[in-house]
Image (spheres, helix red, strand yellow):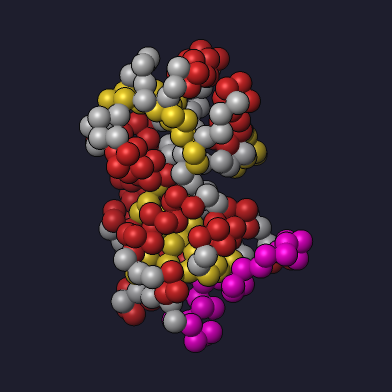
Amino acid sequence: MYKGFLIDLDGVAYWGQKLIPTCRDFISKCHEKGLKFCFVTNNSSRTVDEVFNHLSLLGYKLTKDNIITSSEVTVNYIVNENKTAKVYLIGMEGIKSELLKHNVTLVDEASDYVVIGLDFQLNYEKLAKACEEIFNGAKFISTNSDFRLSRGNGIAPGNGSLTKVIELVTNVKPIYMGKPQPEMLEYGLKKLGLPKTEVAVIGDNYYTDILGAYNIGVDSIFVETGVMKIKDLQAFSKQPTLIVRNLLELFSKDII
């Protein structure tokens, strides 16, 4: 019986700006049954407040403590390792505000860490400076490894693609914070305060959510409301623990 869930956002809780009603109803039932949950997102461009406001407007009952972003995980990693860290940042308001909230010093040179998150104002000089800082010994961190980003007008480069430019130039592999790498989901387990056997990761993307769960040894639930369909799973040897068309089906499977 699961007592907690780590739940992806885009494609599970909403599709773009549009609500996925069965997920909202699922969260309501979690409240009724006293089940724990956190939404987890690789997106570092938005602040927790922005994510919270979006979900609240869609009718979700939650607190800001129910939201985990790759920005939060990144800053937690840095602060735990070096409380006086200096960071050269490529990124948007989500990661910037999280760093400043934890009194991390942002610098243009002599940094301890280079952090890259999605940045719509990225340019050649920013990339060149990041490479220079890494050559000078800064630790290289990326908020997520997503190669593609879905936008209203189609597919665009994701943060993982931008990160690869720096990796290829420096020949230094970054430490990734988002799914499917372990850091974010391990952080989520600690936040839920539950053992792995009582938690499942819920998502619509095999490459991030399902593989992320597999990488930390927890169960996974694939839901067919987003970017991938059930038929797409046939191509993979490692299968999700459960497959549902929508999250309300979980309450008829005697696992909650």
Residue 40: quadrant of the picture? bottom left
Comparing 96 with 139, the one in front is 139
Location of residue 46 by image quarter: top left
What residue do we see at 59% from left, 66% from top?
Answer: 222
Judge left or right: residue 31 versus residue 12: left
**Which region shows up in magenta?**
232-256
Question: If the image is split into quadrants, where does the C terminus sit?
Answer: bottom left
- Residue 11 visible (yes or no): no
Q: Which percent across, then down, holds residue 5?
A: 43, 67
Residue 246 is inside the magenta segment = yes
Name the residue nearer the viewer: 29 or 177. 177
Q: Looking at the image, how many numbered discs can be counted on the residues? A: 0
Residue at (48% x, 46% y) in the render = 178
Side of 2 relative to 159 (left or right): left
Q: Can you give x and y, in whole percent of width and height, for residue 22 in the image?
A: 49, 69
Left/right of residue 158 with respect to residue 229 in the rendered view: left
Q: Quadrant of the N terminus?
A: bottom left
Q: Position of residue 216 (x, y in %)?
A: 50, 60
**Quarter of the image where one finds residue 36:** bottom left
Residue 196 part of the magenta-drawn span: no
Above or below for 156 versus 202: above
Q: Residue at x 67, y 65 (%)?
A: 238
Eyeballing the image, is 243 above or below 164? below
Q: Is residue 170 above or below residue 60?
A: above
Q: What is the x, y in percent for residue 162?
A: 57, 29
Q: In front: 54, or 33? A: 33
Question: Which residue is depicted at the point 66% across and 68% down?
Answer: 239
Question: Can the viewer see residue 134?
Answer: yes
Toward the right, the furthest residue is 235
